Each structure stands twice: as C-alpha cells, then as structure tokens.
Amino acid sequence: MNSKIEHIEYYLPKKYETLKDLKKENPSWNIKKIFDTTGINKRYIASNENIVDMAEKSCKKLIKKNKIKNIDFLILVTQSSPTGIPTSANILHQRLKLDQKCLCFDINQGCSGFIYALAVASSLIEANICNSGIIVCSEKYSKYIGKNDSSCRPIFSDAASSVFVKKSKKSKIRGFVLGSDGNGYKNLIVPSKNLKIGNKTLKKNKIYMNGSNVFLFTLNKVKECFDQILVKSKLEKSKVDFFIFHQASKFVLENLVRKVGIDKKKNIINLNKVGNTVSASIPIALKMALQNKKVKKNSKVLLLGFGVGYSWGGCIIEC
C-alpha cells in the first residue's frame, strides 16, 4: 500500500517582529549584516499561545477546508511542548474531538522532524495499520530565546503546519534517507540546567547554537543525504522539478545550492516571509509554493530537513 500528501495548511500567530523592532531594543545590532546573512526580515511570535493552541488552529483549518473525516493517526512534532506528561498530541486529540481509535503521539525532533514524521506516517499506511492521518508540526522556539541573543532571535519564528497523509494507488512518497549523529548534540541545545561547555556557561532553558559547527555539519552531511535520496529513488538530479530544504537561513541555503549543484531557480525559499519555523518550515514552504503555482500537480520535489541532534532526513514526493 502506498501513501501520498493530500492537503497542507499552516497557522502563523498574529504578533510578529521585524528587524526594525529588534534594532529598537538592541541599537548596537548591525541589522543590514543580519539580513544579508539570514534573509529574514519578519518573524512570528506566539506571545499568548502555546504549541497546542497553534496546532489546533492549523488542524481545524485543514479539517474544515478539506472536509476531512477519517483520521487514523495524529503525529505532533515539537520541541517546545507545554507539558512533560501527557504528550501534546493527546491534548490536541481531545481538542479536535478525534475518535478513540485514532493513535496519537509526539515526536521530539527539530528541523528534520517533519521528514521523520512523514516516514512514520508512510510506514503506518504501508503496513496497513492506518489509512490516513495528520502530521502537525508546531514550534515555539521564542520561549527559549533571550532578548539580546543576536544569533537566534533574528532567525527563529513560531508557527504550526498540518499535513494530511493518506493511502494512494501510486507511490507518491519514496526514497527516505534518515540519520543521526549524537556527537553534535551540544552545538544546538536548550539545557534543563546551567551547563558548562568549554569556556561557556549555558543558561537553563535558553537556547544555545554554535552556528559555525552547525553550518559545517550541514554542508557535509546534507550533500551526502541528498545524493543518497537520488540513488534510493532511482532519479537523476535533472529529473527533480524542485528542492525544498529546511529553511535555515539565506547563508545556509545559498551554500547548500552550490554544494549540491542545483539550479537556484528550482530551490524553494520563503524565509523572508516567515523566518525559520523549525519542523514546520518544509510543509509551509511547500504549501506556499503550491499556492503561488510555482510547484504544480505531478511535480517531483526533493524534501530535506537537517539540524538539531544532529539529525537529518529527506525523501522525494510527487505533488
């Protein structure tokens, strides 16, 4: 039994910040340099919402707009859950009034989280355990970021995406490649207590990112994953219509395009509109590309997420 992505929706909070707003709070910041590096001018902030609130709004939009009735699974990808116990998926299950036969669980994964969840969802369908279900990626990194953090605050944005996956006669999701390297866990971390790394003391519940190390990992491992996806899918690079990488930053994406050797016109970018929305970034970028008709029906798209963990994952989908 095969699977496919049938529908996508997303939710962005009402509140947002621009680089001008950040300049007012941090006059010493070089806003032009930040924009040239990140490509991000506007980011969304969930000031009075948690990730379940955002996930609920995205899912209800998805269900209502597409008249979805059969939901056999609910997978919630997040690293900023409001509760330790129970899972946020259980709370969302109650809010959406889903059937008790619907299985639900969280996946605590970051920028590669959507791909991990898509692999699990496809496996549930192909194993004939489920016929259809929802992957919702909801993230609120803003709660981990200090006001004066010039590395992370100009990048990360709060948002939620929801994706309806169902069985299909034809294989429209294939070539999964997934991987992890726990040796890099300290390079992007929110410690539960003050943590000393080298000469640095990281603050409890605040995000720390070693940008240079994460960048080097990205260039090396993403290229390897990219090549493996094409081999596993039995596709030549020229036969892929579009590429959607995790929307990390302008600097990272420009270097990735050069590293993997693709036409930049085929690379989908929406950073300036929404920022880096962590696990939600790939679904939101795909939805926007479908809305503006850049990506069309039957387009072959390579999806590839990478980041915290370290972790990475990718696949080919047919729209």
Image: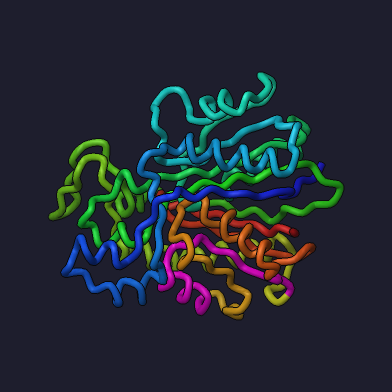
The residue positioned farthest toward the top in the image shown:
100
Q: For residue 175, which quarter of the picture? A: bottom right
Residue 235 place in picture, x, y as percent: 73, 68
Report the side of 168 relative to 156 (left or right): right
Q: Residue at x 23, y 57 (%)?
A: 149
Give the answer, above or below, for where 5 lies relative to 124: below
For the N terminus, the quadrant is top right
Give the answer, above or below, for where 160 lies relative to 213: above
Q: Is residue 257 magenta?
A: yes
**What is the span of residues highlighted in magenta in the rendered image?**
239-259
Q: Residue at x 73, y 43 (%)?
A: 66
The front one of 293 and 171 is: 293
Residue 206 place in picture, x, y as percent: 25, 45
The front one of 276 and 129 is: 276
Report the side of 23 relative to 45 (left or right): left
Q: Is residue 21 magenta?
A: no
The front one of 217 and 277 is: 277
For the C terminus, the quadrant is bottom right
Residue 197 place in picture, x, y as percent: 19, 50
Report the side of 37 relative to 118 (left or right): left
Residue 219 place in picture, x, y as percent: 45, 69
Q: For residue 299, which quarter of the picture? A: bottom right
